[in-house]
Amino acid sequence: MWIAFEKMSKYYLNYLEQLESEAIHIMREVAGQFEKPALLFSGGKDSITLVRLAEKAFRPGKFPFPLVHIDTGHNFPEALNYRDKLVAELGEKLIVRKVEDTIRTKKLTEPKGKFASRNALQTFTLLDTIEEFKFDACIGGARRDEEKARAKERIFSVRDEFGQWDPKLQRPELWNIYNGKIHKGENVRVFPISNWTELDVWNYIKKEEIKLPSIYFAHERECVVTSENQLVAVSHFIRIDANDKIVKKKVRYRTVGDMTCTAAVESNASNIDEVVKEIEASRISERGETRIDDQVSEAAMEDRKKGGYF
Amino acid sequence: MDILRLITAGSVDDGKSTLIGRLLYDSKSILSDQLAAIEKQSKNKEKGEIDLAILTDGLRAEREQGITIDVAYKYFSTPKRKFIIADAPGHIQYTRNMVTGASNCDLVIILIDARKGVIEQTRRHSIITTLLGIPHIVVAINKMDLVNHSEETYNKIVSDYKKLQEQLEIKDAIFIPISALSGDNIVEKSKNMSWYKSEALLEILENVKLNNDINLTHARFPVQYVIRPQTNELHDYRGYAGKISSGIFKKDDKIIVQPAGIKTSIKKIEINNKEITEAFAPQSVVLHLQDEIDISRGDTITKEENSPAITQDLEVILCWMDTKPMEIGNKYLIQHNSKQVRGTVKNIDYKINVNTLEKESGYSSAQLNDVCKVTIKTASPLAVDAYKTLRTNGGFILIDETSHVTVGACIIQ
């Protein structure tokens, strides 16, 4: 029996290899089906993982799409440095469109308040960018385990000409057959790592020895303690009030979004093995621990997606 | 560690979402902030119970109506396995979403309400899961707490289902009495049903053998994309990128490019830019061929042995998924793996009555959620297999050429 097992195990993929192959297949479907695809790149670990998968799908050829960064202007400097270095190493094209420019040209109202987030305004810039370049498919690093509205989304998610998602009328999506047929003006959001969990991503980063922006690992930082007891980095993007409690802590980031709406977690994990261990032991979800914007309402994400968010 | 993809099926209010919630809760896979959110919303809070179904009903409309409209995917792991659970809707009108969730599952849990027994949706979902060739079936008789954990009631339902099982020629089905609400036989064996001697549900899910489900004998490689860097140093590089859907390919293997039938051999296999001598399903690789031949997206690379059928005439079981009916003579775009061709429906041989399982003939159109046997003619040949032999090469979808929506799922006979 053991001999039989040994024989079989030669043709066996473990779960990470299965997920990787599935994601590469999805990326190649995008390349095969669309005229003007793009890869949405934020500088976070999920989009960094997408870049590695794209290398696996298309090298030694060039990527059949540019990287597109919708820049809110509220980035961690470490993430921006990382982005520019990565793009230079890859030799691929990067398109940056700034939320600030959309605010100016479209006369949008800047959100006010203590942690004024441009997260919602990002959608305007994204939709404008899609229109400007006539992108018909945008690859994103969203995962279904992140949030309950995302848990509902197809791998090829069709958006109308306003970028809107209609969750009650999604196309059937069978087997590994992805229907990317759309009308002019519509676009498809494609999520190759839909079936990965946060821990899968971290384990993949570890296995592949992917470099990450330094803020993913423990470092000293001055943070404001919010009313929900979250730690938000002190920066000139947030308003510091006189009675704010400011602490200096050893922290790392579990996700990298805007400085205004991403919270840090206290941690001593200074390398990938230690981070994986912490994530394994964590009893609180990634978004729950680190995103300030999702706590607004039960359907916050669903509403944003319906409005064109990715 | 491997992955088990499973789906829960059953009628409305059979407790599918509750079961998934329970599996996640009892296996300690619900995180504290998610639990807090559920507790806040639970209607049964005064009784001290939390409504676990809330966990998967992720849309506002679902929470408002207390039903599942579309598939929600949930993830958890035990030391033995990673699980991907598709929580599918039970309403007949959302059957297409159930089909979406079921199409690439390894295992289905068919839930039956112990008070109601085998009903129309049990039959419909059993037929669909059989058609989709889901290799493993678990029949969970739920809400046992509402029938006093009666062994007699359980046995009666099991014997009713076995009749259906015989009709549908389902080889193996595992039966288990559970209560998703109170957690009986989900993660721990139930103290209320000591007459049930077998494993709890989670153990069943952990121990189902998946090794034999991947076909390693019928080599199929649908070409997705051609990699041609066209740079000075890689001037002659021409790699065919795709995912091996079944079988094994080795360097120097003789291959046939279908449907054209051109023969050549494999010069080189690459994975992640590195050369390897052998690759197998479901790996995504790049193949290089000995001769320069015309190959593009949509072609399938196969071998001489166990070759697919090359045909323009397809006999299929069709699940119709659009509100607009399908009429004989209609033309559709067919997508079979990476290949797209046009096709027309020549005939509806019969419809399957999901209650009686009888084949009813004389129809000229198919309505939403109908399951029928149809004949399709394609504009050019496809390299196909019977779904029963090769799930990964025996299914295709129909796309409406004007709306671009996926309107039909076809299972090749």
Image (cartoon, coloured by chain):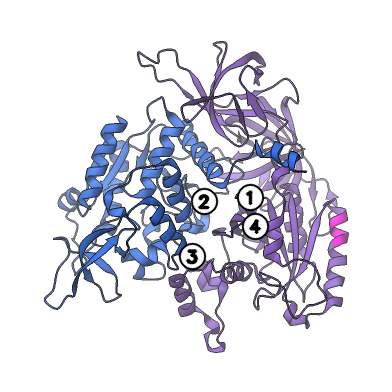
Chain colours: A blue, B purple
- Of the two numbered discs 3 and 1 in the rendering, the one whose residue sits closer to the viewer: 3
Read off the chain for label 3.
Answer: B
Where residue A241 appears, x then y in whole percent?
Answer: 13, 74
- The circle on residue A292 is none
Residue B172 appearing in the image: yes
Where residue A65 appears, x then y in whole percent?
Answer: 36, 33
Question: How many neighbours does mark 4 have within 10 angstroms: few (below 14), some (14-19), or many (20 or more)?
Answer: many
- N-term mark: 1 or 4: 4
Q: Quadrant of residue B157?
A: bottom right
Helix, strand or loop at disc 2?
loop
- N-term mark: 3 or 1: 3
Residue located at (71% from left, 36% from top)? A7
- N-term mark: 4 or 3: 4
**Label 2, label 3: how many angstroms apart (C-alpha)?**
19 Å
Which residue type does callout 1 highlight? Met
Where residue B369 appears, x then y in whole percent?
Answer: 68, 53
- The circle on residue B59 is 3
- Of the two numbered discs 4 and 3 in the rendering, the one whose residue sits closer to the viewer: 4
Q: Which residue is mark 4?
A: B7
Q: Which residue is mark 1?
A: B321
Which residue type does callout 2 highlight? Asn
Q: Quadrant of residue B166?
A: bottom right
Q: Which residue is mark 2?
A: A195
Which residue type does callout 4 highlight? Ile
Residue located at (18% from left, 53% from top)? A103
Helix, strand or loop at disc 1?
loop
**Decide: marks 3, 1 in contact (CB < 8 A)?**
no
Where residue B33 appears, x then y in whole percent?
Answer: 43, 71
User: In the image as oriented, which residue stretches furthest toward the top?
Assistant: B291
The magenta stretch spans residue B275: no
- Of the two numbered discs 1 and 4 in the rendering, the one whose residue sits closer to the viewer: 4
